[in-house]
Amino acid sequence: MDEQMFCFQCEQAAGCTACTGAAGVCGKSAETAAAQDRLTGALIAFAGQLIAAGRGPPPEQARLLMQGLFTTITNVNFDPAAVDALTRRVHDASPGTGPDYDMQALWREPDADRRSLKCFVLFSLRGMAAYNYHARVLGRIDPELDRFFCTALQAVGDPGQTTDALWQLVQATGEASYRCMELLDAANTGAFGDPEPVQVPLTIEKGPFIVISGHDLYDAQQLLEQTAGRGVNVYTHSEMLPAHGYPELKRRYPHLKGNFGTAWQNQQREFEDIPAPILFTTNCIMPLRASYADRLFTTSVVAYPGVPHIDEGRDFSPVIEKALELGGYAQDTLLPGLNGGSTVTTGFARTAVLQHADEIVQAVRDGKLRHFFLVGGCDGTRPSRRYYTEFARLTPPDTILLTLACGKFRLNDLPLGTVPGTGLPRILDVGQCNDAYSAIRIALALADAFGCGVNDLPLSLVLCWFEQKAVCILIALLALGIRNIRLGPTLPPFLSPGVVRTLQERYGLKPIAAPEADLRAILGRH
């Protein structure tokens, strides 16, 4: 095998199979890919040592595991030196461990289904680690989950795992993924309150400002605290949009003004010559363009060669000074949504939606509300992703669209009006991918209200996936027994034909088709 790298963990994998050249489609170099493989191999060996010792990892070692897995997610860390430094930290934390696991043993596993199932678990663990890491920052830790990470990593590196055992591990990983999302939800709502619906302007007010991207609400809170009274406004970008719905952020920090731009994959165009600094707290960072490279900052696990990095002390003074230096726009500037909208609404997490549960149930029974759709997920660059906008446009007026994650930027500024008989907007933004727990809880609560199972609800999931947090959400949904999920724009390349067949047989998993055809098929069943 003469490949310079091997990576097929995200939806944009070259040729829908794998990136194997000098760089991945994401821009990750073969050098960085090799560094991430070394880090993963070290983490697998580290996990095996901890299991052999008969104990779960102590908090600091668990945090290192989460940090290491999080670092290998697509579009998080492009700096091979930073990745290698993290590998050395893993080695220092596990003296006496035998040789690291060689990731080539996984990439070259001759049994396609065994390789597929191990990758399904590994990539889910990477996404789960991101959620676990965010929860840990806010003080929420689950030792049993920490131990599960070790058990699952050890199994990924075990050549003796049977296909049946790996299917059982997929189920266990899905259950653990759901618990990780629950842990993060408790951390976020415990620190910042239950999200509340709020209309968010897409106009950037004149004067100095900072754009903050990523998922980490603790980083957002720290930036807001440090900019208070400094004459610098803060605007969310992409994954950080849900911050506006948290009352402890919105009410305490009136300089949290609005949202800048749309989904992560549009950043190279939207950041062009921006008169303000951008702070990346997690993914998704893309290869930089010269027009804004001098005003980018990273923190936490994010790193990019040559970009200033704010360490764990979270002193954002350099970012604030850059904002004051650049001065912002000279006048208020509207940066409309993908469909031309000037505002978006967020904050429809489970508490906000379920306050209207009686109205929703009555509207269904009165025939005013026919169907619920969950349309969202990770966004990306393929033109076929226009499917999700068109699907939303085509949904009838007597339906509700729950949406979450970056896929919502394809549709969250569409003027679809309200649901007859409830006053609720037809589009309910639940949050980001880390808010999938809320969407699941909404579905479970509605099933209870109607006295049926989730799969018997007039509810259809039409999801887009991109990277590993979406993979861990998918595996959680499957573990909960949720059927007939439509997934696109392509099925994951790491799922072998045999594994896909089994997922279709057990769970009714299916690829998206044309929006008109999918909508007819869905509504024809209800």
Image (cartoon, helix red, strand yellow):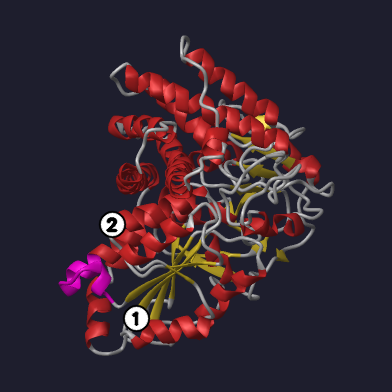
Label whose residue precedes the other's in the sequence (1 or 2): 1
Seen in the image, is 130 located left or right of residue 81?
left
Seen in the image, is 330 located left or right of residue 459?
right
Tell me the residue at 72%/48% (across/down).
Answer: 208
Tell me the residue at 72%/46% (across/down).
Answer: 27
Query: How far across and how far down the image is residue 105, in percent?
Result: 53, 34
Give the residue type at disc 2: Leu
Give the residue type at disc 1: His
As drawn, the label of residue 371 is 1
Tell me which secondary structure the magenta stretch mostly adopts: helix
Which residue reaches farthest front? 110
Start and end of the magenta stretch?
445-457
Q: Report the front residue among 481 and 402.
A: 481
In the rendered image, which residue does mark 2 sit on?
A: 480
Could you tell me which quadrant the C terminus lies in? bottom left
**Residue 355 appears in which quarter of the rendering?**
bottom left
User: Mark 2 Cα within 10 Å, few/some/many (few <14, many 20+)?
Assistant: some
Disc 1 versus disc 2: nearer the observer = 2
- Reply above or below: 521 against 298: below
Seen in the image, is 418 located left or right of residue 316?
left
Tell me the residue at 38%/44% (across/down).
Answer: 184
Q: Report the front residue among 433 and 261.
A: 433
- Reply above or below: 133 against 250: above
Which residue reaches farthest right? 290
Whether 455 is among the magenta residues is yes
Could you tell me which quadrant the N terminus lies in? top right
Q: Report the front residue among 89 and 53.
A: 53
Query: Secondary structure beneath disc 1?
Result: strand
Query: How far across and how far down the image is residue 64, in percent?
Result: 47, 25
Q: Is residue 76 visible?
A: yes
Query: How far across and how far down the image is residue 194, in percent?
Result: 35, 53
